[in-house]
Amino acid sequence: MSDITVVHVMRHGEVANPDGILYGRLPGYHLSELGRRMADRVAEHLASRDVTHVVSSPLERARETAAPIAERHGLDLVTDPRLIEADNVFQGKTFGVGDGALRRPENWKHLINPFKPSWGEPYLEQVVRMMGALDAAKDAARGHEAVCVSHQLPIWIVRSFVERRRLWHDPRKRQCTLASLTTFTYQGDKIVSVGYTEPARDLVPVHLLAGAKGVKGKDKAFGA
């Protein structure tokens, strides 16, 4: 058996969210039609890969993204709660560029510490659970490849940790576009490289691409 194992960590596809709610961990948020096309595109992209394990966050949007990949490889889809979205006190509300959220006094107490952060799940807790989920996927697919479907913030945080960057950051600069793959290559039990690809890039709205400038009324922090 090869001592090289590859774990692809995928962000789910676009979600149907016409009201612009920061949905976070709320149930009932499913992929849009475009999101399903993104999921199918990535399943096609990975069809020739040696994928032997597919696991997702328990949230609907992640499971719906992972399903075509598991089906293409004839695998059962399993879930791991460690892949879930980061907790956030603004869940269920609108909170984005140009909506005035930062000017509301009732929100200020949640914005005092961007380093922890004070508005949600501590970055270090995200690192611990995500590293555990990646290690479990690596063990399940040892010598082959695994796909883990998760959410933007936990993916970016675990990548930042592995690449030895600070964990606090500007959310607009995360390199983790919808339906993207952040790929961790293990030699034995050690991560030896990290890669990043966007198989569905042409399907992603321009203002949502990694590093794109926020657009008033569009660039909402919906929960990813």
Image (cartoon, rainbow, N blue to C red):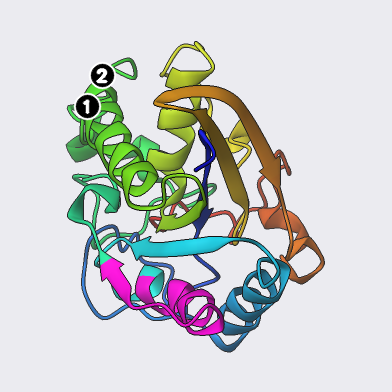
Task: Specify the principal SS of the magenta part.
Answer: helix
Q: Quick check: 111 above or below 197?
A: above
Q: Could one spot residue 17 in this view of the protein?
A: no
In the image: residue 185, left or right of residue 84: right
Question: Residue 27 sits in which quadrant?
Answer: bottom left
Q: Quick check: 37 above or below 2?
A: below
**Observer-nearest of 65 and 104:** 65
**Residue highlighted by disc 2:** 116
Q: Quick check: 141 above or below 111?
A: below
Question: Residue 54 sits in which quadrant?
Answer: bottom left
Residue 38 position in % (x across, y down): 64, 74
Q: Are marks 1 and 2 in contact (CB under 8 Å)?
A: yes
Q: Residue at x 23, y 57 (%)?
A: 80
**Observer-nearest of 62 and 74:** 74
Q: Amino acid at mark 1?
A: Pro
Secondary structure beneath dot 2 equals loop
**Residue highlighted by disc 1:** 122
Q: Residue furthest bottom?
A: 33
Q: Residue at x 30, y 28 (%)?
A: 127
Q: Which residues are magenta?
A: 63-78
Q: Residue at x 32, y 43 (%)?
A: 139
